[in-house]
Amino acid sequence: MAVLNAEERIECMRAYRNVLFSFFCEDLFFKKGLFELLDSVYYESSSKCENIKSLNRVESDDYFWIEIVVLSSKSIFEKLPKRDRAFGDDGAGVVVFCSENITHVIKGMSGYENAIFFTDDLKLSDVKRVFRKIIFGGSDNRKEIFERISFDRLTDREKLVSELLEKGKSQQQISKLTGMTVKTVSSHLRSAMCKHHVNSVVEYRVKLSYLKDVKSN
């Protein structure tokens, strides 16, 4: 996984009210566009608010950290940035801009449990609405936006076939190694894939490699 150093993180941060945004985006033009979009959301909403003092008054313990991750490639093999949650699950979220096929790979992974995804068919109005809720909506609105996604626990057999799949074994090879029928192996894989929110064996293999990378770090 790609990791930002401290200086890169500071250069990629913006604060609006009590919300801190940090950015992982290698496309400078896209990043500049995000900066301008956030500025417009903040100042447009501020200008519509009659009581500016009440707008700027926030609860001292109501701080939130949003990481915006932009994955420009359509490939599910693209490297993901490692995320460190500074404020815990209730005080952090991640907004991911990516292709549709990589959303299944990312969902539920460590650091990406509280995530919202914008894919190829995104609408600018939807993005602005989400950013407006994040900045001005308070903690209740943020909890609605960032639905927590987690993995259900795998059974011992699901874990075994998953480990062998991650090592590059085919379903036929897994069958020979474990003594299960191919049909049983396939059934366990389908169940494990469902618990990990993926739609195909290829996506699952990639997700397993990412999960292994997370554990090794």
Image (tube, rainbow, N blue to C red):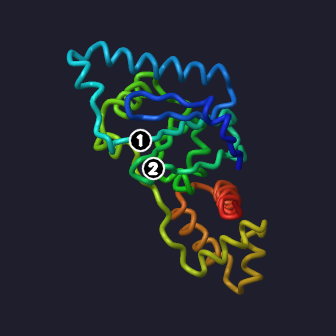
> Residue at image x 52%, y 62%?
194
Relative to 201, say whether 179 is above or below.
below
Question: Distance of mark 1 from mark 2, alpha carbons?
Answer: 7 Å
Q: Would you say 54 lies left or right of 131 here?
A: left
What's the amino acid at mark 2?
Phe
**Residue 112 sits above or below residue 183 on the image:** above
> For mark 2, does the 10 Å Cα neighbourhood hold few (<14), some (14 to 19), or many (20 or more) residues?
few
Give the image location of residue 212, x and y in percent.
69, 63
- Report the residue marked by disc 2: 87
The residue lying toward the viewer, choosing from 59 and 141, is: 59
How many labels sit on residues? 2
Could you tell me which residue is drawn at 32 percent across and 19 percent down?
45
Location of residue 99 (image quadrant): top right
Q: Amino acid at mark 1?
A: Phe
Q: Is residue 126 left or right of residue 32?
A: left
The one nearer the camera, 136 or 154, is 136
Regarding mark 2 in the picture, which secondary structure is present there? Answer: loop
Q: Which residue is mark 1?
A: 64
Q: Nearer the viewer, residue 183 or 86?
A: 86
Dot 1 and dot 2 residues touching (CB under 8 Å): yes
Which residue shows up at 65% across the image and 45% down it?
81
**In terms of image quadrants, where is residue 200?**
bottom right
Provide residue 112's location: percent of width, then percent of height.
Answer: 53, 50
The image's mark for residue 208 is none
Q: Is residue 40 above or below residue 17?
A: above
| Residue 162, image x, y percentages | 66, 70
Q: Assign the C terminus to one quadrant of the image.
A: bottom right
Could you tell which of marks 1 and 2 lies nearer the N-terminus? Answer: 1
Picture residue at 38% right of the left edge, 41% below the top: 63
